[in-house]
């Protein structure tokens, strides 16, 4: 390969040949104006046996194309081309060690997310990654730390709560300083529980309910859908809204919006507020 075009194209093309992109996606990434040059370069590399089919390229390419088309059609805030590029560039860290966490990570890979990390709840996700916290019942206390980190860094994150025998909760997508935080969610849920004084005690006990595989897959798919719409279009309907997948006598999916708690100890303005003249600090 010689010439000025090759010197300009190859440094951009070669890093993208990692087995996760189709030819069409390479053209979208680098621009349709250089499509003939891309095809010629790939053909030459293939002739010299320097290319091989990516392990998941066809499957992920189809999933990414379908996901991008869906995001563009449903949100009406992006184009298929922009959504495809956003998925290729996306980085998501799934926190959790249970089946739902693993299934969620798999769903995200199938829709073509560029990089998906599956980490333990106590692990530190890489900078810039969207965190999707999918704890098991025993890992629920870790969400407080995840919330604190997100508030400190100003980064969005999504929670997926484990099946408790009645329902599975996906969301809200927490957006610091714009939506309720995890602490607000717990306070609001406790106030609506009917046993507010004992809510924290009850919730601290790990549920022994087992989620059947179809229900786990439904919850993971719903979480992946939320991630897809956020990463491609910053869908404004997502922050602060959670979905409840109820699986009792009748299967039902409902949603609610969580409002911020003005006096929230985690995200409220209490720390910066000026004390009243009659305020006396406890010793």
Image: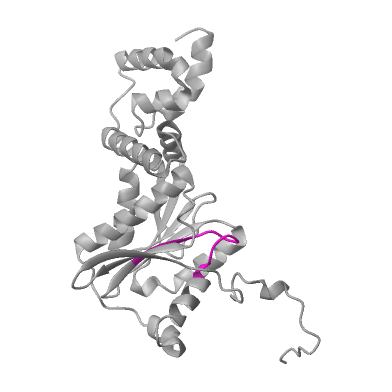
Asked if one can make out residue 204 in the rendered structure from this viewpoint, the answer is: no
What span is in magenta?
Answer: 169-182
Q: Residue at x 55, y 56 (%)?
A: 155
Which sits in the foreground, 113 or 186?
186
Q: Residue at x 37, y 43 (%)?
A: 74
Q: Is residue 203 above or below residue 16?
A: below
Asked if one can make out residue 127 in the rendered structure from this viewpoint, the answer is: yes
Q: Position of residue 270 (x, y in %)?
A: 67, 76
Q: Position of residue 23 (x, y in %)?
A: 35, 24
Which sits in the foreground, 106 or 125?
106
Give the left or right position of residue 174, taking residue 213 as reference. Answer: right
Which residue is at the far bottom? 283
Q: Is residue 246 above or below residue 59?
A: below
Q: Is residue 65 above or below residue 217?
A: above
The image quadrant where one finds the C terminus is: bottom right
The image quadrant where one finds the N terminus is: top left
């Amino acid at each position: 390969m010689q010439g000025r075009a090759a010197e300009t194209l190859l440094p951009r093309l070669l890093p993208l040949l990692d087995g996760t992109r189709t030819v069409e996606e390479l053209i979208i990434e680098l621009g349709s104006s250089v499509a003939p040059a891309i095809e010629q370069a790939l053909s030459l590399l293939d002739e010299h046996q320097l290319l091989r089919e990516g392990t998941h390229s066809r499957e992920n390419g189809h999933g990414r194309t379908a996901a991008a088309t869906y995001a563009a059609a449903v949100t009406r805030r992006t184009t298929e081309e922009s959504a495809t590029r956003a998925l290729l560039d996306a980085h998501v860290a799934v926190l959790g060690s249970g089946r739902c966490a693993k299934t969620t990570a798999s769903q995200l890979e199938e829709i073509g997310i560029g990089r998906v990390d599956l980490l333990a709840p106590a692990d530190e996700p890489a900078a810039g990654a969207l965190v999707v916290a999918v704890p098991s019942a025993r890992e629920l206390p870790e969400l407080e730390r995840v919330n604190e980190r997100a508030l400190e860094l100003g980064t969005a994150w999504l929670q997926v709560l484990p099946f408790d025998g009645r329902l599975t909760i996906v969301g809200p997508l927490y957006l610091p300083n714009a939506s309720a935080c995890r602490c607000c969610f717990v306070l609001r849920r406790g106030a609506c529980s009917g046993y507010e004084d004992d809510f924290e005690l009850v919730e601290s006990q790990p549920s022994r309910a087992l989620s059947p595989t179809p229900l786990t897959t439904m919850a993971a798919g719903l979480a992946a859908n939320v991630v897809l719409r956020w990463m491609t279009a910053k869908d404004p309907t997502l922050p602060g809204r959670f979905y409840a997948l109820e699986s009792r006598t009748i299967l039902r999916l409902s949603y609610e919006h969580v409002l911020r708690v003005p006096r929230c100890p985690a995200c409220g303005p209490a720390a910066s507020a000026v004390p009243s003249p009659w305020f006396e600090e406890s010793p």
